[in-house]
Amino acid sequence: MILVDEARAGLLLQLAHARFDPYLSEAEIEVLRDSASSLDPEESETSAPRPEIRPEFVRWLATEPEAALHIDPKGLRLYGFTLPEKLDLGKCRLGFGISFFRCTLHGGVNLQFAEIGVLSIVDCTVEGSILADGIDIRGALLLRNSIFSGEIRVVGSKIKADLSCTGAKLRVSDGRALSLDCAEIGGSVFLSEGFESSGLICMVNATIKGQLDFKGAKLLRLPMAPPFADLPAIAADDSRDALTADCAEIRGSVLMTQGFESSGAIHLDNTTIGGQLSFFDAEVERVNCTDLKLAGDLIWMGIRISERTVLDLTGARIKNLRDDWESWPPQDNLLLSGLVYEELSLHEPSS
């Protein structure tokens, strides 16, 4: 296999020299060799230098038909590099995936209406937007443990497997942080395990075939605590939204547990959920569930409430309401008109 890898790398190098001579950097040659190899590149140290490679070089490597013949099925692998400008792969059809690991992407990435295998951006810094409206991803979309300073847009997208943003920090100063409107997700959506967002997460009319997991996430509203304290200030607004999933279809459970916090409103109006909707060990302000259709249980327990906590279940239809007295918001902030449920399980707080 090593001989095959070396042969593929040699052929790629010939093609690259023909296209980019007289200049081809050592960093770009390394990307060629890594992408031709059946072995994953060695992981660089977090503090290691990230040499620059040209976005036009990456685009050529991703889209040149003759070059694609010599890329390993694992796809393009960029470990520890810097792209100084936007990478434009809009409307491109790639027969493989792309993995960025410990990279810095200045200017973001355009993947609008592209077709691609797995797209992985892990342990990276992205200074710009990820524009992927209408993208068709044949595998997973992995945006893990990275810092994003612009909007992630995957409106109208098709993602065959999971969308995972575990550990990601979405540091937008205002507006939308993640847009999944009308997206079709074949697996689950993980916004968990240290995930934080300072902007609106929007998934109106989205279809998620698995679960929606917010375990341990923080949906923040300015003024913020670290690590977002260096962002421009926005005046506090009690109506500021954190999550809007109106009219979405989520076939699994929605989990807002294990220390989940939201300082903005959560909208699940006209949403259909096939599993449970769980708020357990959570801190929330306004939760709107008007006309919610919930096939499983609504778990509302261990809630850290304040005088501003509101729960609106107007017109909701749920299987079983599992709650405890201490988690109910003030009477004027509890809206139950038209609520229909099959069972009620009241739990006494543990001593």
Image (cartoon, grey):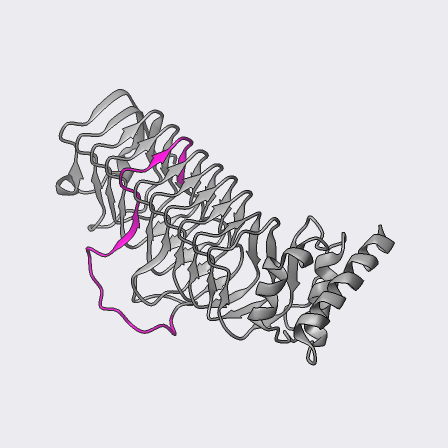
Residue in the image at 70% along x and 58% along y? 35
> In this rendering, does residue 48 appear at all?
no
Viewer-closest of 186 and 286: 186
Q: Residue at x 22, y 68 (%)?
A: 235
Task: Relative to 60, say whether 112 is above or below.
Answer: above
Q: Is residue 114 left or right of residue 347?
A: right
Where in the figure is residue 223, as x and y percent of width and height? 30, 67
**For the magenta stretch, what is the residue range?**
229-255
Q: Quadrant of residue 315?
A: top left
As rendered, which of 349 and 277 lies closer to the eye?
Answer: 277
Q: Residue at x 55, y 52 (%)?
A: 119
Is 49 left or right of 180, judged from the image as shown? right
> Is 245 colored magenta in this rendering?
yes
- Furthest residue to the top? 342
Q: Is residue 58 visible?
A: yes
Q: Nearer the viewer, residue 68 or 250?
A: 68
Prevailing secondary structure of the magenta residues? loop
